[in-house]
Amino acid sequence: MDVVYTIHQGFSNTALLYFLILGVWGFIRAVRWQSVSSSYAGALVVAQVLLIVNIIIGGVLWLNGRDANMARFDVHVLYGAFVLVFLPFVYVALLRGDDSNRAQWVWGFVNLFMFFLMPRFFITGI
């Protein structure tokens, strides 16, 4: 199970850096008055898939009793549920499929918000 735990940590670190890249890329596009492109939307889908895979790996760890060492397992699971629904929520409820420049600004902020929030996810997982 140590290998699975290492993979879970690796996916978490990858997601952290990926959200930083998406946030910076989003702000660069927004400052240039560009709307959400299909490339950027595809990168958002990749981010969501990355998070889903990491949640599945975390579920495998939980089923094998890895949560026994965690001080705040319940909060870590709550954060996992948050990241599962946050990006789709922004797309469906907040932006409603909008791909204008305003939406590009929102995605830039959302991705940087995720980047700054993810270290808190890590702390609860230790």
Image (cartoon, rainbow, N blue to C red):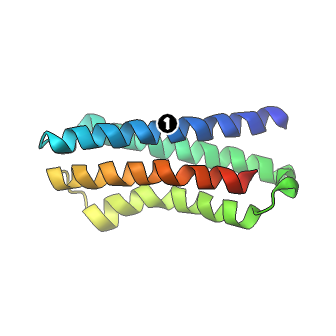
Q: Please state the horizontal and vertical placement of residue 47, each as a whole percent of the image.
A: 46, 42
- Asked whether residue 9 is in view, the answer is yes
Q: Name the one closer to the observer, 20 or 54.
A: 20
Q: Is residue 108 left or right of residue 18?
A: left
Examine the image and state in which quarter residue 46 appears.
top left
From what the image shows, is residue 113 above or below residue 12? below
Q: Residue at x 86, y 49 (%)?
A: 64
Q: Residue at x 49, y 51 (%)?
A: 116
Q: Residue at x 60, y 61 (%)?
A: 79
- Asked whether residue 100 is in view, the answer is no
Q: Please state the horizontal and vertical placement of residue 58, each as a whole percent of the image.
A: 71, 48
Q: Please state the horizontal and vertical placement of residue 113, each as a whole percent of the image.
A: 42, 54
Q: In the rendered image, which residue does mark 1 sit on?
A: 17
From what the image shows, is residue 17 above or below residue 67? above
Quarter of the image where the N terminus is located: top right
**Considering the numbered disc 1 on the image, is that residue within a helix, a strand or a loop?**
helix
Examine the image and state in which quarter residue 102 appears.
bottom left
Q: Is residue 97 left or right of residue 34?
A: right
Q: Please state the horizontal and vertical placement of residue 21, each as a whole percent of the image.
A: 39, 36
